[in-house]
Image (cartoon, rainbow, N blue to C red):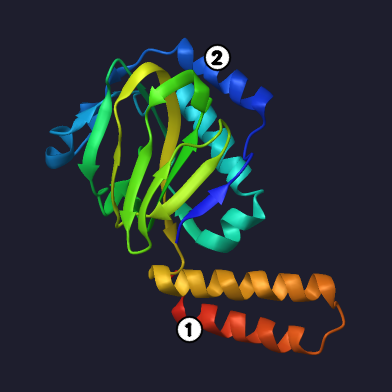
Amino acid sequence: MLLHVPDLFSADEVRAMRDQLEGADWHDGRSTAGHRAALVKRNLQLPLDHPVARDLGACIVDRLGQTPVFIAATLPLRVLPPRFNRYEGGGSYGAHIDNAIFPVPGTTERVRSDLSATLFLSDPGDYDGGELVIEAAFGTQTVKLAAGDLIVYPGSTLHHVTPVMRGVRYAAFFWTQSLIRADAQRRMLFDLDTAIQSLASDHPEHASIDALTGVYHNLLRQWAET
């Protein structure tokens, strides 16, 4: 499932975030890549313990917790603290699949990357290139969103970022471990939840609402991993 969340952050909020990112000390992005990914990764990244990364990452996680569509679509169990990258001067990230398991910095916890996500922090007109290209069962999707918009997609997909030939592309990225491991089951629950919410809005007294809600929770109870 591919999920576009528009306006996760407002233009003013993104501008303030970008001001902090522009003044930060960036490092070679290959330092956090696995062996295969390091061969195709050409970008800059904030160190995981950088104060700007910690502060902005906490802000993003807090906002996700206040975003019903993100919660409904991902059913998050754990969210890895967001990371930040910067592409410019031909920087790109070749085709790769994200690691299946990520350690949570400073803890003994691990996060399974059921879902990958990119939060765009640069306006599309400010740079050429930099498209996120996702190859999945639903076909190849080319994504270049407005600053403040979020894209969520299965972590198991092959994807890449095209070269940025003009300007600078800033973004945050992170992974979510869902209560529901299988993408098809998550999609079914999301569609069912969306239908229930629509029915409840249009016909709040409809007798089927309770029955459908029961089906949703029984499926969630059957499939969820905690």
User: In the displayed structure, would residue 5 be above or below residue 23?
Assistant: below
Asked whether, in this view, residue 70 is left or right of residue 43, the answer is right
Residue under label 2:
19
Q: Nearer the viewer, residue 16 or 77?
A: 16
| Quadrant showing the C terminus | bottom left
Q: Residue at x 48, y 59 (%)?
A: 77
User: In the displayed structure, would residue 169 be above or below residue 225?
Assistant: above
Disc 1 secondary structure class:
helix
User: In the displayed structure, would residue 195 be above or below residue 131?
Assistant: below
Task: Residue type at mark 1: give it.
Answer: Gln
How packed mark 2 is, by other alpha carbons closer than 10 Å (few <14, some 14-19, many 20 or more), is: few
Q: Quadrant of residue 50?
A: top left
Task: Residue type at mark 2: give it.
Answer: Asp
Where residue 113 appears, as percent x and y from the top left, is 34, 54
How packed mark 1 is, by other alpha carbons closer than 10 Å (few <14, some 14-19, many 20 or more), is: few
Disc nearest the viewer among 2 and 1: 2
Asked whether, in this view, residue 67 is left or right of residue 91, the answer is right
| Quadrant showing the N terminus | bottom left
Q: CA distance from mark 2 to mark 1?
A: 46 Å
Q: Residue furthest right?
A: 205
Asked whether, in this view, residue 129 is left or right of residue 147, the answer is left
Q: Residue at x 34, y 43 (%)?
A: 133
Which one is earlier in the sequence, the residue at label 2 or at label 1? 2
User: In the displayed structure, would residue 162 be above or below residue 225?
Assistant: above
Q: Nearer the viewer, residue 181 or 157?
A: 157
Circles 2 and 1 in contact, beta carbons < 8 Å: no
Residue under label 1:
222
Q: Nearer the viewer, residue 102 or 86?
A: 86
Q: Residue at x 66, y 48 (%)?
A: 66
Q: Residue at x 56, y 69 (%)?
A: 190
Where residue 46 appears, as percent x and y from the top left, is 36, 23
